[in-house]
Image (spheres, rainbow, N blue to C red):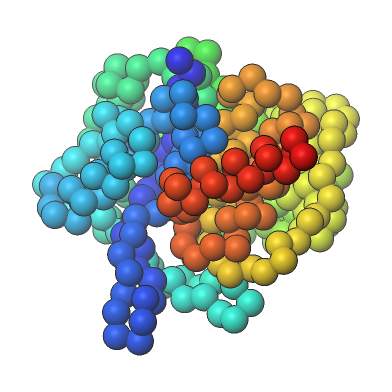
Amino acid sequence: MKSMLAIGECMMELSEYSTSLLHRAFAGDTYNALVYAKQYEPKIDCQFFTVIGHDQPSKAMRAAWDKNGINSQSALSIEQATIGIYAIATDNQGERSFSYWRNQSAATQMMKVLTTDKLLNRIGKVDLVFFSGISLGILTDEDKHLLLNLIQKFRQHGALIAFDPNYRIAMWQSVEHAKTWFDLAYQHCDIALPGVEEHQVIYNHNTATEVALYCQSLAVSEIIVKSGLDGTYIYGSSSLIDHQAFNPAPQQVDSTAAGDSFAGTYLSSRLAGNSISLALADACFVAREVVQHKGALLPGDVYQQMMTSKINNNCA
């Protein structure tokens, strides 16, 4: 059985259900991707490394992981902290804005609970490790180094490493601060999933080619560049491999998990042994469908109906 480990923070999500009620869910970028990876290929053992508390919200979160088929044996619990919270607001075009309460969350302590060697022994051998700029951004700089050291150890033990910058300006002291850590992350990964938009801000790159050349210079071997209306490009270590044109959803309800669902589907497909072209096509399809629904995670039955419809359409 293939295995995938996601590293990061899962938070309590609060979204407007009515004018007087909020809906509670649990989400976070790498966790969302992990759930979509599991939905795409249920045979993959999907593990999540984070830290949560021992309180009721933390227990409810762990129960939600179990319900989604996520292996939580790698998640640690501590007494002195609890999970982070964010509230989400979505405008009439489906674009979202967030308010966060996470500065002292348990996940920010993830590299302080166990040593690197003890973490490696607890988690065991995995085939693919996925982390993001948010996984780094919640940590102190000292702990960022420890996380990258852990990731390097996984790589030395044969795991593929995937990194999505997922740049959030509020998580970094400056653009230069983010650039320093993103460069190190790229140097530690085999698969990168950058976007032209975030590279414009951080590196002054304006095209997919510029983004790819930069990642290639840091020895990334598989580069998936998300380029907005220009579509998605995939480059190898030296050349363009594939391109998927942008195919907008007929109605965008909520773009919260577009990137997460894309990343999870792509990585799951590649881990399952599929070609780059098939992985790209399926990732674009899932992301396009996900934005037509409210919330970060599609319910399992809705996801299955979506994939069944896709298969039937392909066979028609």
Residue 121 placed where, x, y %? 30, 17
Image height check: is 220 above or below 68?
above
Give me the residue at 37% from left, 48% from top: 9
Toward the top, the furthest residue is 157
Q: Is residue 117 shown to the viewer in this render?
A: no
Toward the front, the furthest residue is 316
Name the one closer to the observer, 44 or 155: 44
- In the shown orientation, is residue 265 left or right of residue 130? right
Give me the residue at 21% from left, 51% from top: 60
Image height check: is 242 above or below 198?
above
Image height check: is 166 above or below 33?
below
Give me the residue at 46% from left, 62% from top: 295
- In the shown orientation, is residue 259 left or right of residue 60? right
Residue 26 placed where, x, y %? 34, 55
Q: Quadrant of the N terminus?
A: top left
Q: Quadrant of the C terminus?
A: top right
Name the one closer to the observer, 244 or 236: 244
To which quarter of the image does residue 109 belong? top left
Q: Is residue 249 shown to the viewer in this render?
A: yes
Count of picture labels: 0
To which quarter of the image does residue 243 belong? top right
Residue 200 placed where, x, y %? 75, 59
Residue 50 placed where, x, y %? 32, 40
Give me the residue at 70% from left, 47% from top: 284
- In the shown orientation, is residue 219 left or right of residue 76? right
